[in-house]
Every structure is written in structure tokens, then in C-alpha cells.
Image (spheres, rainbow, N blue to C red):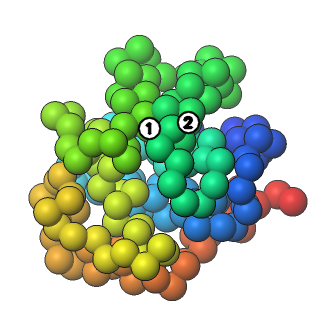
Amino acid sequence: MVTPELIEEIRRGYALRWHGPHGVCHWARVRETALRLALITGADAEVVELFSVFHDARRENEGADPEHGPRGALFAAALRGRMYELSDAQFALLHVACADHTRMLTHGDVTVQTCWDADRLDLGRVNITPRPEYLSTAAARDPEFIAWAHRRSLRFTVPEIVHREWDRG
């Protein structure tokens, strides 16, 4: 679903440091966490994978940027049908997951919940420890899962996909 060509298209307009706190390594950790959670929660794997690369793709700074989620959702809409395919129902979930990931605590759909949990579980990269009360799914609230994800974010783990496919230049 997320191809090297899609990553290259995102990179062309990415305003921040590629390997910065909200950049490609964060997206790849969110992707791995989301896909692992989706196996447990039943979330839509295509949606959570696309969320991982779009949710911070249009940030304008590393600090307060309250409109970055809606900009990411609009960017995802602009590339739909050209760089990736989703049904209308899937795209509606992707759109709300991106647009509201910093605005809302929870959502009624498990796919949106899984997206948000995957992002929140990577907060160690900005010196924040994930707290179970801010996670939506039981799988994400599992102390062992939190510890696994938090260790990865504190170590700034660079998932293999970054080296293999996403870091072309």
C-alpha cells in the first residue's frame, strides 16, 4: 500500500528534517506499531499503514502546529486514486484519523483508534511517556505493548523499511 513512489511524493513537499522527530523514522515506527496492533484489534491494515505516512506529512514545524492533521488529510485526498486506492469508507476513516489525531482523545471506530494509539505509543521520541488512559484499545494499553513501543521510540529505532525502501536520497 505504501510504496517508495508514495514516500518520494510525500518527501517532495515535506517541510521539516527528513529524519527529525516527526519524519520518516517516526512514520515507520508508527506503521510497524499500527500493523502489529491491527492484528490484535482487527483494524483495517491499509488505512493504518496510510495513516502512518500522512498524519504528520504536512507539518510546518516540530512544535505547536494544530492544523497539521487537517493538512495531512487534505494531502491524502489529493493523492488518492493517483498514488494509492481506498474505498470511500476506508478513505473516510483515513481522513478522520489524520485530521483529528491531535484534536480528539478517542473515536468509535477501531481503525481510527488503532491509528491514534500507534502514534501515541511513539511519544518517547519527544520525551513523553505514553499513558494508558490516553490509549483507546485494550491491545495498546497492555503494559508489555507500551514498554515495547516506548523502548523503540526512546532509542529512535529506524525500522528496516526506511533503509530498504523509504530513504532514497
Q: Tag on residue 72?
A: 2
Towards the viewer: 164 or 122: 122
Could you tell me which residue is drawn at 65 percent across and 48 percent down? 60
Q: Secondary structure at mark 1?
A: helix
Could you tell me which residue is drawn at 61 percent across and 47 percent down? 59
CB of mark 2 within 8 Å of CB of mark 1? Answer: yes
Q: Amino acid at mark 2?
A: Gly
Res. 50 in view: no
> Which residue appears farthest toward the top when viewing the image?
88
Please indicate whether residue 142 sits to the left or right of residue 72 in the image: left
Please indicate whether residue 89 sits to the left or right of residue 4 in the image: left
Q: Amino acid at mark 1?
A: Cys
Q: Quadrant of residue 106?
A: top left
Please indicate whether residue 11 sits to the left or right of residue 24 in the image: right
Measure how far apart labels 2 and 1 are at the Cα level.
6 Å
Locate the C terminus and report the quarter of the image it occupies: bottom right
Query: Which badge, 2 or 1, comes first in the chain's sequence?
Result: 2
Residue 58 point in image, percent of width and height: 62, 42
Residue 137 point in image, percent of width and height: 17, 53
Towards the viewer: 146 or 68: 68
Residue 130 point in image, percent of width and height: 28, 71
Q: Relative to 159, does residue 2 appear above or below in the rendering?
A: above
Q: Tag on residue 121?
A: none
Could you tell me which residue is drawn at 27 percent across and 42 percent down? 104
Circle 1 residue: 98
Towards the viewer: 3 or 80: 80
